[in-house]
Image (cartoon, rainbow, N blue to C red):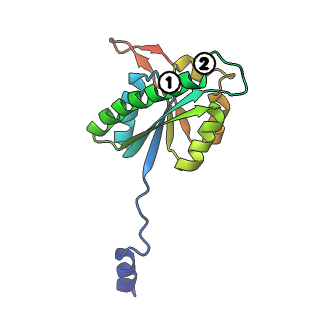
Amino acid sequence: MASLLLSFLLNGRCRSQKVTRKIMVLFDSPSVRREAVQYSIELAKRMDSTLVLLVLIPFDLSEKSAQGIESILQLGSRAKETLQRYVDIIQNAGIPGEAAVRIGNPRSELVKFLAESGRFETIVWGGKPEIANKKAHWLSPMKDIAECAVVVPFIRDKRGGSLKAT
């Protein structure tokens, strides 16, 4: 009986498949903070995870904006080019990586992206660190919806001390 159970387990019928862990690096502009990507690469190595870079570019068609659709699309195109350079760096570090750019209401776009992409173990905030902790920022209520840790990397000076603790 024991050998039958062992055979059953070894043949893969009860073996769980490896679940791919994912870490999102989230930006609210095409300006990518290098230290956020570096932090994420090190975290992904420790967690054996894939990195997903996501830029959310705020845009609302209902508001009269100085930025027209054409300029927003150019901004999105520039963001894609920037992200691709970082995906190359991530992949050269031996980490699977991918990138996406979404244009629209940041809250809505993040929820849609999460629904399409599945669960993330961690979200690393790649935008300005001081913005992430403001209650008025769109990221603040998203921390509960994402159902994962949201991390804001520390920026350290050359002497090893913290410049900004968030």
Residue 108: x %, y % from top left? 65, 37
Q: Is residue 49 above or below residue 26?
A: below
Tag of residue 67? 2
Q: Give the residue displayed 32% in from the left and 42% down from the top.
A: 95
Q: Give the residue displayed 60% in from the left and 18% down from the top.
A: 67
Amino acid residing under circle 1 = Leu
Amino acid residing under circle 2 = Gln
Asked if the residue under mark 2 is in contact with the one under mark 1, i.e. CB atoms within 8 Å, the reply is yes
Q: Residues within 10 Å of mark 2 (few under 14, many from 20)?
A: few
**Where does the N terminus fall, quadrant-wise?**
bottom left
| Residue named by callout 1 | 75
Q: How many marks?
A: 2
How far separated are the C-alphas under marks 1 and 2?
A: 10 Å
Q: Is residue 147 visible?
A: no
Residue 70: x %, y % from top left? 55, 24
Disc 1, SS = helix
Q: Nearer the viewer, residue 67 or 127?
A: 67
Q: Nearer the viewer, residue 108 or 122?
A: 108
Is 128 positioned to the left or the right of 37 in the image?
Answer: right
Choose top left, top right, bottom left or bottom right for residue 44: top left
